[in-house]
Amino acid sequence: MEAIATCIEGLESITQLEIKEILKQKSEIVIPSRIKFKVKDEKDLANFIYNTRSSIKVYKFIDSFTFESLNDLLDKIKKVKFPNITSPFVVRSERIGEHDFKSLDIEKEVDLKNPTTIVLIDIINNNCFVGIDYTGIKLSKRLYRIRLMANSLNSCLAYSMLRISEAKDKETILDPFCKSGEIPIEAALYFNKIPLHQKQADKLAFQRLVEFTPKNKPTNKKLKIYAVDASQNNLKSIEINAKIAGINKSIIFSRYDIEWLDTKLEKNSIDKIITFPAYPTNIMPKDQIEKIYKELFYQSEFVLKTKGTITILTPCPELIEKQALVYKFMKEKEYKINYVHQQFTILVLKK
């Protein structure tokens, strides 16, 4: 039995890492953001869905093909050999790319209110994947994200940054621009092995298809995760979100500007800085942003341990690297991703 996991384009390696950790299986990137892997059975697939933190959707793979037009697409869908499908069922279509048709042109709906089986037509440009949706919801939507703002970070991306940083549960982690707190919260949830969807397990589509009992045993580790932000409103947001997530006691919340780090934290006390700082916009000009970046590396040089790293998400890597070189931070990793319809880069910089 094969399955497809969808993820943020450019971060396929993180989902592949999860597949290896959870299922002990190899996987392949069939196209950007789509990863194919094998599972023993439906329970194995349900187990992966329940435990993955980087996947957006996961479905049982039936067939795939390329197409040239809507008529070509529909003709090829009709030729797909579907397995026995538990009724009632519904057909859903999701699209990425420019097309001269809409998802509704593909969907033939039956019992929309409570389908047992969701047949998924997954279209990316001129590629089409057909499968049975075992998620039903977007796994990237976390219940704890109640207090958000315009620049809040996608939770799957926040988790992926954590894994890219190679942070460990015994290390001290800092996000000096925490906003609504996705990075610190995802870190605390991951280190404590707390399932993301345990409070909405009934909404997961596999519950209608297979009997599944989670084997997870969450922990209550003493963590050193610092969530820092200059805005009182931002700090209030992360405190509320962290409480809803049930891990507020695992995070140390503080309100102060970046230039106060060396007075609030001890020298060489931080293992990993993982953050998403502001970037140039019409409201925040380039020269102001460069001052923030300069201060970030000045302070990081003081608070980071000898082998400490900074993992940064940015749409302007050249500005980050410019200031990093001033303080002798060297680029260790680089990931190019497509995020909110814009090119972003994740940089890992080593002291």
Image (cartoon, grey):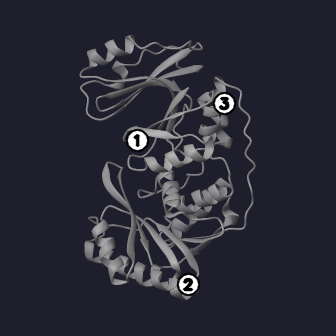
Q: Quickly name the residue at label 3.
A: 43
Left or right, 232 with reference to 32: right
CA–CA distance between discs 2 and 3? Answer: 46 Å
Return the x and y of residue 318 as percentages of the image width and height: 28, 69
Earlier-in-chain disc, 2 versus 3: 3
Q: Foreground: 320 or 351?
A: 351
**Relative to 106, residue 318 above or below:** below
In the displayed structure, 305 sits above or below 48; it is: below
Q: Which residue is mark 2?
A: 268
Residue 151 lies, in percent from the top left, at 41, 58
Query: Measuring 53% from the left and 58% from the top, which residue is drawn there?
Result: 163
Residue at image point 63% right, 27% down: 41
> Callout 1, which amino acid?
Ser
Q: Is residue 6 above or below residue 240?
A: above
Question: What residue is drawn where x is 72% and y is 39%?
Answer: 214
Query: Which label belongs to residue 92?
Result: none
Residue 35 is situated, as x and y percent measured from the top left of the image, at 45, 38
Q: Which residue is mark 1?
A: 33
Ranked by sequence position, the earlier of labels 1 and 2 is 1
